[in-house]
Image (cartoon, coloured by chain):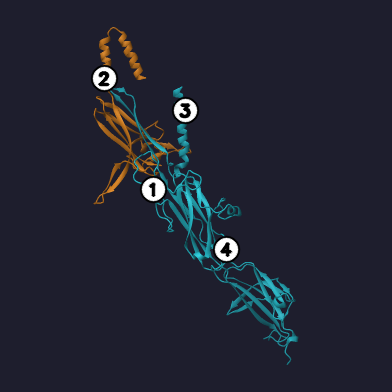
Amino acid sequence: MTKLTKIVAAALVAALPVVPVTAQEATAPTEAAEPNVSLQSDVKAYKETTDADGNVSSELVEPTVFTPGTRLSFGLSYENKGNSPATDVTATNPLHEAVQLAPDADPALIVSVDGGTTFGILADLQVADETGATRPATHDDVTHVRWTIAAIAPGESGRVAFPVIIR
Amino acid sequence: MRKTTQLLGAVSATALIVMSSSPAFAEGIRAGTDITNNVTVQYQVGGVQQTDATDSDTFAVDRRVNVDVTAIGGAVNTSPGAQNAALAFDVTNLSNDDIDLALTTALTAGTAGNISNIEIYLDADGDRVLSAAELAAGPITFLDEVGTDVTTAVIVVGDIDLAAANGDSFDIALVADAHAAGAAGLGTELTESAGDSTDPSVVDTVLADGNGGTGEEIDNDGADSDENTLNVQGAQVTVVKSSLVVSDPVNGTTNPKAIPGATILYCIAVENAAGAATATNINVLDDLPAEVDFDSAFGIFVDATATIASGVATCTVPSGSSGGTFSAGGGTGGLDRVSGSLSDIAGGSTGALYFQVTIPAATAPTP
């Protein structure tokens, strides 16, 4: 819709006598904005290894088992392949109902428990129970996870992830 | 038009997911369910909102096989010669997929020669008792198409040989082994998927069962078992018949002697040993010696109280109730016969029958 409007605007502008200047001004940001934020959604498994000293380290591996109760990492890798910074980036990840947010997820994670209408940290959210009374939301109630990134500079990449458990 | 169709499609797909996933949560999401993780990124460049970037990742839920077999109730008492002595079991599919279950039994303790025809029947009405209809349906060797979380009641029966004695016991294990569902009849046995299949679209099989401690199967082999015990409890009945001189024509009731004309009380005590099964349908038959006459005026008393000490039965007179039958010449060899039925005698209890006879004066030797 936005694009359509712009094209119409450009056509209108072209019809006017002062064509070149405005046209150039109009095209300049379009060229500059080869906005190309690429995304790669992934699912990884946690593999815990214990070294000789008994220290347990967890690494992400390609998952082989997807049985109920399995803990997985749902991740999002992003990269700004364009030449302008991407700003006000929000990545919204609806949770498939076959998985639930793992209880050890980062408490600061921004989530929704009402189908994506409102977002906040889990500790601040409430849900209505069967009787209509409200109770504090739990990991089981989470319907969406959202990340907010102020800006992704050109060439910058990163990965965000959260743990889930297959129901 | 296209948009409308898509919208409708999307709506019905959501409804389907809701319907199919809600009952499956007890054992987890059903095997084969595709879980798609969608991510949408909104961002601005130069203050202008850009087209959303999206990506998704899909994997299929694997099959986690878990089976539970539970014996119902404690050990069951049976008796020598019992047909279809029954043990009840529950078999539950705790997998996140439908499976077939192969059922087998094993005698894990007890003398194999004293039990035979160990078979499994479906307890169709779930009352833990093998009804005539369930017996007529015939024995089973597998359960077909057992849904997730579905529990099936079965009954394992065996025939106890008459040679089995009081105190014998038989431990019978029931083993349920997961096989693939789908086709009619028993499918192929489910085995752990080999290697590490990293293809997320393939439904692998993971065997996640425990073991029932019967030694008939192990952890993570797709099978579970449990066992229960049939205890053989025979009735151990002993009979003691004792006589007591009640009176004689000379001494009366004071230190009476068994002289002609004397009255004799016969006490027949039936004892069932402690721990034995209740003896039922007890019928006492006593052929009288030809030398004595039945005292019909006194009659016969059944279910009397008696004790047995040092091989001597002592009846409490009066006790019990009038009953029994006298049949002149009805016994073996034309002897007079006294008979009477006693009520059931539990283990550790004694029942008795008593009656009187007289020694006819005619049989007395000439002094």
The disc, 4 or 1, on the residue closer to the chain's N-terminal end is 4
Residue at image coords 36%, 46%: B194
**B119 or B86: nearer the viewer:** B119
In cyan, which chain?
B
The disc, 3 or 1, on the residue closer to the chain's N-terminal end is 3
Quadrant of the rendered image containing residue B337: bottom right
In orange, which chain?
A
Mark 3: amino acid: Leu
Mark 1: amino acid: Glu
Q: Is residue B319 visible?
A: no
Mark 2: amino acid: Glu
Residue A31 image label: 2
Residue B8 image label: 3
Q: Is residue B7 above or below residue B117?
A: above
Separation of disc 4 and disc 1 at Cα? 42 Å
The disc, 3 or 4, on the residue closer to the chain's N-terminal end is 3
Q: Chain of mark 1?
A: B
Separation of disc 3 and disc 1 at Cα? 40 Å
Q: Are marks 3 and 4 on the same chain?
A: yes
Residue B192 image label: 1
Please provide percent x and percent y for residue B69: 47, 53
Mark 4: amino acid: Ala
Residue B82 image label: 4
